[in-house]
């Protein structure tokens, strides 16, 4: 029998970190030593996670290939599988198959200014790319990271943000939509409100945008208004997925399957796909 | 290709029965008043019917509901994963050309890029015996897509009803093998037999009452994206999903885990329907909220996307089942007619 493309590989939870309100980051290691060695992925890819007895869900990889030997997934406990995952403890076994989908451009954007605009847990897939870029920091020019959440307790990856902001020629700006507990010292407003606060050289900047669909929508409008070309805006597309293999049909748009040909697209490509984005 | 054979009609059942030692033999049967497929011997085999059975043989390659794994989570640290793949040897007789091409389309989808383990196991172990259509039924339009009424490819064996006998084309090694198992029942076809099949094909082609302008469909469909016809045509839809379920090329599915009790759970996959509102529902939004968008998706997927993605392989084979089964009389030939007449 050929290798079963639907078979989950057993993977053990090595560490659990409370990332933000209702968001946990799981550090995972494959049970099979051969998988530990052979498993390779690129930033932007995702996997199908199984909580046995509950189900399967697509989750993007937040660790970076530059961090060897383990895999990290940051999961908001909002659905059946993700809530069950939040019940898991260190040492428990779950299932994982992947990696699936295409990847963020990396070598293609070498030498450029890089602008990241992330909302909420949308920073998770970008974090994979950002850490990869910081591991090869000299390859890129200025890196700006704009990060927004609904309120301060939703902020993810604060250690990473702190670390990135301290690297020369790099900047991190954060914002929250609201500050109910009056504890926030930085900007208040949607993430797009940070754009006027930084210097952007349109000639050399490539923007990576990831977050909830409504945020992506408005940030892309902001960027277009600033004069960004459609092929200089890179984003990820959210679609319902079951198989991750381009077969089950749910994420089909035109002749493309978001799980297979995506989920990373430039705004230019999204326009060409046609369906409401 | 091997030479064509003849088998007498009254020997067909004997031949199929002779295979039943090695294969499960599936034939057209009437089940609960509906013509579909079932095991030979369980009910009367249907050999004389116009057009295609309402239920396609898709079920035998891609079942409506299929167990794919059993998980036994003995404790939180140990899980046994058992794979289920059906490797039963099967012969399916009486597959109409629309369905032969339908199976070929499913082959392309399930066996390219990532190879689908479950589909492949069934496909590899099944011998497909086609049956040309001497007379289409009222909703058939395979002629328009060149996927019938007589098949040119995509079969292991292909039968043509010549009255008191069948002409048999051999299309593959698998086909040769099963003919050799009944070698005494087959004789070599005469030129007159082949000529008769040719006449029957011509006659059948003239009997179609529906058609689509296939060349124009591909050209004009993209321009119809924002047309009001999608809203108008989708209006009577009652969201039953029947069009998807009878379609020989529809392949969308869900994957779900069912707790069997204790630590045992089963992962199943089952057919889904792009016509149902939940098909594209996500936490943040539903990308096809309106029925007009969902109908448009079905028609575009059948008539544009599949061919674009898979090198011209047809997404629609003109079997007309979606027309026959629709309680709201939504008719793909009527819709495509509106598109191409603009």
Image: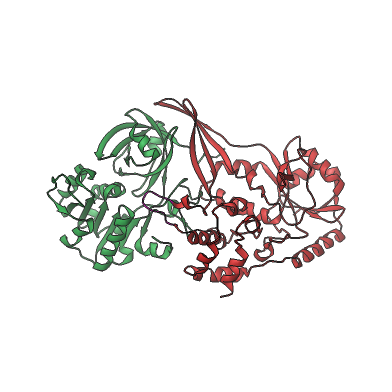
Chain colours: A green, B red
Q: Position of residue A249 (x, y in %)?
A: 50, 51
Q: Residue at 76% of width from left, 43% of height from top?
A: B178
| A154 in relation to A207, above or below | above
Q: Is residue A40 left or right of residue B307?
A: left
Report the number of discs: 0
Query: Which of the two residues, A268 or A33, is positioned nearer the viewer here?
Result: A268
The secondary structure that dominates the magenta segment is loop
Q: Position of residue B260 (x, y in %)?
A: 51, 29
Q: Position of residue B54 (x, y in %)?
A: 68, 52
Q: Which one is nearer the viewer's eye here, A202 or B1?
A: A202
Q: Is residue B128 left or right of residue A222?
A: right
Is B204 on the left-hand or right-hand side of B218? right
Extreme residue in the bottom direction: B342
Say if the magenta span includes residue A262: no
Residue sitting nearer the eye, A100 or B180: A100
Quarter of the C terminus of chain A within the rendering: bottom left
Could you tell me which quadrant the N terminus of chain A lies in? top right
Give the percent coordinates (x, y) of residue A247: 51, 49
- A239 lies left or right of A202: right
Q: Quadrant of residue B286?
A: bottom left
Q: Which residues are magenta?
A: B281-288
Residue B287 on the magenta segment: yes
Res B305 seen here = no
The residue located at (35%, 33%) in the rendering is A29
């Amino acid at each position: 029998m050929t290798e079963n493309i639907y078979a989950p590989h057993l993977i053990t939870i090595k560490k659990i970190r409370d990332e933000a309100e209702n968001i946990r980051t799981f550090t995972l290691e494959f049970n099979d030593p051969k998988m530990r060695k052979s498993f390779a992925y690129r930033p932007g890819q995702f996997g199908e996670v199984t909580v046995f007895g509950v189900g399967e869900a697509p989750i993007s990889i937040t660790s970076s290939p530059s961090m060897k030997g383990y895999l990290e997934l940051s999961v908001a406990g909002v659905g059946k599988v993700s809530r069950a995952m939040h019940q898991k403890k260190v040492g428990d076994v779950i299932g994982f198959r992947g990696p699936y989908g295409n990847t963020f451009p990396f070598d293609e954007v070498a030498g450029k200014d890089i602008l990241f605009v992330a909302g909420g847990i949308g920073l998770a897939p970008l974090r994979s790319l950002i850490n990869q870029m910081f591991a090869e920091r000299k390859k890129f020019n200025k890196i700006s990271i704009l990060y927004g959440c609904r309120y301060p307790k939703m902020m993810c990856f604060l250690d990473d943000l702190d670390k990135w902001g301290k690297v020369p020629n790099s900047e991190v700006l954060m914002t929250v939509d609201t500050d109910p507990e009056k504890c926030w010292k930085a900007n208040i407003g949607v993430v797009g409100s940070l754009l006027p606060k930084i210097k952007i050289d349109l000639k050399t900047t490539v923007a990576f945008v990831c977050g909830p669909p409504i945020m992506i929508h408005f940030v892309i409008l902001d960027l277009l208004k600033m004069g960004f070309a459609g092929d200089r805006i890179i984003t990820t597309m959210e679609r319902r997925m079951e198989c991750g293999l381009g077969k089950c049909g749910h994420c089909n748009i035109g002749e493309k399957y978001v799980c297979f040909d995506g989920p990373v697209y430039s705004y230019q490509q999204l326009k060409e796909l046609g369906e409401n984005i | 290709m091997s030479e064509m054979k003849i088998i007498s009609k009254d020997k067909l059942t004997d031949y199929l029965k002779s295979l039943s030692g090695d294969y499960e033999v599936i034939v057209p049967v009437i089940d609960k008043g509906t013509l579909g497929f079932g095991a030979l011997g369980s009910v009367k085999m249907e050999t004389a019917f116009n057009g295609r059975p309402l239920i396609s043989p898709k079920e035998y390659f891609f079942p409506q509901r299929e167990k794919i794994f059993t998980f036994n989570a003995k404790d939180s640290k140990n899980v046994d994963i058992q794979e289920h793949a059906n490797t039963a040897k099967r012969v399916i007789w009486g597959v109409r050309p629309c369905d032969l091409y339908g199976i070929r389309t499913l082959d392309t989808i399930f066996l390219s890029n990532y190879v689908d383990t479950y589909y492949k196991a069934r496909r590899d172990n099944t011998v497909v015996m086609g049956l040309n259509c001497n007379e289409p039924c009222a909703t058939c339009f395979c002629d328009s897509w060149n996927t019938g009424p007589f098949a040119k490819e995509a079969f292991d064996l292909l039968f043509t009803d010549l009255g008191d006998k069948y002409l048999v084309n051999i299309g593959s090694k698998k086909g040769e093998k099963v003919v050799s198992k009944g070698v005494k029942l087959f004789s070599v076809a005469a030129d007159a037999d082949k000529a008769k099949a040719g006449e029957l094909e011509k006659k059948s082609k003239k009997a179609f009452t529906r058609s689509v302008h296939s060349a124009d469909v591909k050209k004009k469909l993209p321009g119809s994206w924002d047309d009001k016809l999608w809203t108008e045509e989708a209006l009577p839809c009652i969201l039953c999903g029947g069009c998807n379920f009878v379609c020989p090329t529809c392949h969308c599915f869900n994957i779900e885990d069912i707790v069997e009790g204790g630590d045992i759970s089963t992962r199943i996959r089952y057919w889904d329907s792009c016509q149902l509102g939940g098909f594209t529902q996500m936490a943040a939004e539903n990308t096809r909220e309106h029925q007009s968008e969902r109908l448009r998706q079905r028609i575009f997927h059948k008539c544009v996307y599949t061919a674009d993605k898979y090198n011209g392989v047809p997404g629609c084979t003109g079997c007309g089942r979606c027309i026959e089964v629709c309680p709201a009389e939504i008719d793909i030939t009527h819709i495509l007619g509106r598109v191409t007449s603009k």
